[in-house]
Each structure stands twice: as C-alpha cells, then as structure tokens.
Amino acid sequence: MTTAADAAREFVSGPHVVQAGRQLLALFPLVALCEALGSARPEDAESLLEALERLTEFEEVRGTFLDKDVVGFLSEGAGAASPRLRSLVAKLLFRLSKSGEASIAGMAAAGLFSLCEPLLLDEETGTSEAAAASVCNGARSPDGPREVLVGSALNDGSSLAERLQNRLSEVPDVPRIRVLSLFIQLGRESSDVFRLLEARGAYEKVLGAFLTDDLLLQLTSVELMDALGSFADGQEFLGRKGVPEKLALELNDPNCDASVRVCLTRVLAAILRRTPAAAAVLLPTQQASFPQSVAMLLDSRDHAEKLCALNSWADASTSLEGLTFFLRWAPLVQEILDLVASTQNEVSKGAMGCWATVLQDRAPPGAIAEVGPESELWDIAVTRLLPMVLQNLKAKPFADVRAHTWGLLSILIRSRRSAQQTLPAQELRDLLLDFHSESASPARIAKHEFVKALVRDHAQLLGNFLDAEVDTLLQEYAKQGPHWVPRAAAVQVGDQAA
C-alpha cells in the first residue's frame, strides 16, 4: 500500500508540473500530507517537506492551505523545532501574500499574519525575510488587514507591529535590527503608516540603534539609517530639530568607521535636500564635519566613496543654501569639475550625473544679466563644464558614458550661451546627424532628448549654424523619436557660421 511519504517521494522525483501536484493531492489531500509529516520518521519527513514546498509554488493549490485543518498545521509549524518546517511556513505565507487581494483577505481571516511574529524573530535569515515580505505585502494591499498588521491610533497593543515593538528590548541584536528594518519598509509604503509608527517611537528606536557606543551594533545598523534616509518621510523625520546635529557629531569621531562615514554623509545630504534649513547646522563653515566628510570622500581612491561624495554634494546643492555654500569653496568645485573628465568611466558618469542633478531644476539666466548663486552656477556650467562634456563625446564613445554625456548636454543646451558654443563645436557636428552613432537604447534616447531641447529652445538660432535641410531634418528627428533613421542618413552638418 502506497504511503503519503512514498507518494511524496514520487512527486518530488518527477516533473515539476501542476498535473503531478494534482495526482498527489488526489491520493493524499493536503491535510493528509500535513498529518503524515507530523508523525513521519526522519527519512520520510524530508520528502514530505519538499513535496509541500513544491505544492506551495502552484497557485491553484495555495488556496487549500487556508483550510481550517491545514491552518492548524501551519500554526504549529511556525513554532516548530525544525528550521526547514519554519522556512516552509514562511515561504508559504510569502507566496500567499503575493497571490492577490482574496488570498490576503483569506490569510487575515485565518489569522495567518500572526504567525509572522515568531517567524520574523527566527534565527534563519531567509525565514525572517520571507515573513517580513509577507507583512509588507499585506500592509501594501488597498483592502489589506492594515489594522491587524500595524494597528490604529488607539495603540491597544493588538497589532503585529505593536507586539514586535514591545518585544524589542528582550530580543538579541540581529532580530531587533530585522524588526526595525520592517518598520522602515512599512513606513516607506505609506505616509499614514509612517506617522503611526513614528508616533509610537518606532523610528526613535532606529536612531537609538545607530547612535550607540556599541560599535558592532552601530555597524549593523548602518543599512537601517541608509534605508530611513532614502525616502521623503524618513528624510523629514531625520531633518527635525536635534537629529542632524546628533548625526553630524558622529562624523567628528576620529575612529568613525568608513561604512558609517559613507552612510552618514549620504543621509545628511538627503536631509539637506529635503530640509534646506538644516544648512544652518550642517554647513556653518568649511571646517564643519559634513562638508569635511564630503571633501575627504572626494579625495578617496575608493570609487564608491568618491561617488558618495559626488552625490552628497549634488543633493546638498539642490537647495539654494547648499549651492551658495559650495560655490564659495572654489577648490572643491574645481575638483568636481575635473572628475567629469576622469579616466575612470564610473567616476566620470557619476560626476556628469551630479552636475545634471544640480542644474536640471534651475532655469538658465535670461538675456538680462542676473546676479546670484544660480547665475554663477550657470556661468561655471557654460564656461568650464560644457567644454569638458563636449570633449567626452569624442574621448568617451562608450554606450554607457554617452547616455550620461547626452543627458547632461540636454540640460546645458537650455542656455542660449551654451547653444552658441555647442552648435559650432566639432565634437557635436561629427555626431549630431550620425543616426548610427549610438548603438544602445539609453544613449539613443538621451541624444534624442538633446535634439528635442535644441529644437524646442533654439529654433531661431539653428539657422545661424545649420543648413535649412539639416534644420528640417532635426525638426523631424525631434518629432519622430530616438530610434528614427531617415532615408538620407548621410546628410552632413553644414559649415555655415554665425
């Protein structure tokens, strides 16, 4: 007589198709397989576990795991001694939470989300991560069990998030970090959830884990701070009174770990971008800890640190306060300009991307001379940055670099002064009407954006530099799209001067 374990072995060794799953369940319904696992010998348990894992991958089977008798097995499995069984339950919850609104509603009705609590604190990383993803999927659902997961303003302690927060003081560092990471993920999904968790002090716990004398715990918490500083609500929280000062003080520590320095520099720059008023605290002088950290990382031989410095400068300079501060630091500005021509392509791309970030939301000065930081920025861009970017068209013909080069040129070309210098440049004239100059789609799209900006902003100026035929061709190119190639693709840029 075939046993459940025998049938499971045959299923596991056969083709991984839903028809095989149906045949297994016709012989032994899901509840029978679960009961067999509960009393199985070790050699049989492995086959039964693997069979159940495979069954969870079939969408038509997952719904049967919500049956009352099977839910009881899952509840026991979430607290079982077997890591494999706990992993099975976590994977199933994750797959159910991805299966649509009806599945999430069924999970909530069956009380399955409560199983995520012990699984989130599991010592196995994969099990914990699957449980966290299940909670996020449930909270993300428009009609999901948000009150079951994160609670309400009543703070009655009944929600999963409240229970987890209440247990933070009693669990080891690693699961505590995972729970705090979950709070950040939940807050990223919804501003309402963020405010709810913030009111309970969840994000103060994140700060507390990072601002500690325990170096090991601080290093473990670096990713938490990175994550919290990567979205708007988190940045606003970190930008509130007292927090930027505390973070900046960490940079003053001569023993500050490199990963902590990179994280803090990036986070403080994000705070400045979101909360420009923080410049009064973070940018009082060039000797302050944040700008000194930017300068230190910019001089690093490590490309990741150099790119962090570039991005931090760009984020800080998107605000008028940050821009004004850094424009007064001429050697630093020159160093950032020089990196556009770096022989290291990743650094060159990063530098061009950062200049694009700083310039993109700032209109170029008009015909009447203007005075101020933004006018000074555009003067630097036209007189010192533009020649280097044009040189990159020729010196760096690589597809990934070209996408950044054309992208920055499409921003620079908005300036009339820039257009007057760009159109006669040989580097541009060699490529402008070469419709095969870019083989990769991102570069073709970026080049097309440049042509669109050129035609849109300088239609009257084009006639001074281009033949009428070329002018017409550019108009058509701008209209047709990045992958358009005219029949007469060999038309050359005319030599008519202004």
Image (cartoon, rainbow, N blue to C red):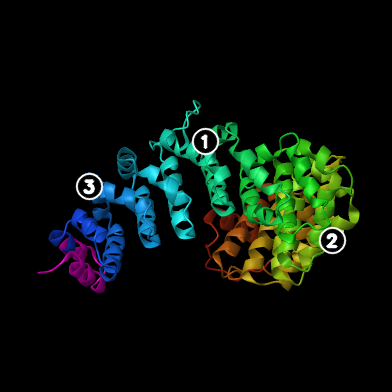
| Left or right side of 70 for 258 | right
Tell me if mark 3 has few (under 14), some (14-19) or many (20+) residues whose alpha carbon lies within 10 angstroms of its own.
some
Tell me where residue 168 appears, x and y as whole percent. 56, 43
Q: Nearer the observer, disc 3 or disc 1? A: 3
Does residue 250 belong to the magenta stretch?
no
Farthest residue toward the top?
154
> Disc 2 designates what residue?
335
First in sequence: mark 3 vs mark 1? 3
- Pick the front one: 471 or 421: 421
> Disc 1 designates what residue?
193
Asked if residue 95 shows in the view, the reply is no
- Mark 1 vs mark 2, CA separation in Å: 43 Å
Tell me which residue sits at (89%, 51%) in the image. Answer: 329
First in sequence: mark 2 vs mark 3? 3
Q: Amino acid under label 2?
A: Glu
Dot 3: element: helix
Q: Where does the magenta region start and end?
A: 1-23
- Mark 2 vs mark 3, CA separation in Å: 68 Å
Residue 387 found in image quarter: bottom right
First in sequence: mark 1 vs mark 2? 1
| Left or right side of 157 for 308 | right
Tell me where residue 177 appears, x and y as whole percent. 58, 50
Location of the C terminus by quadrant is: bottom right
> Disc 3 designates what residue?
69
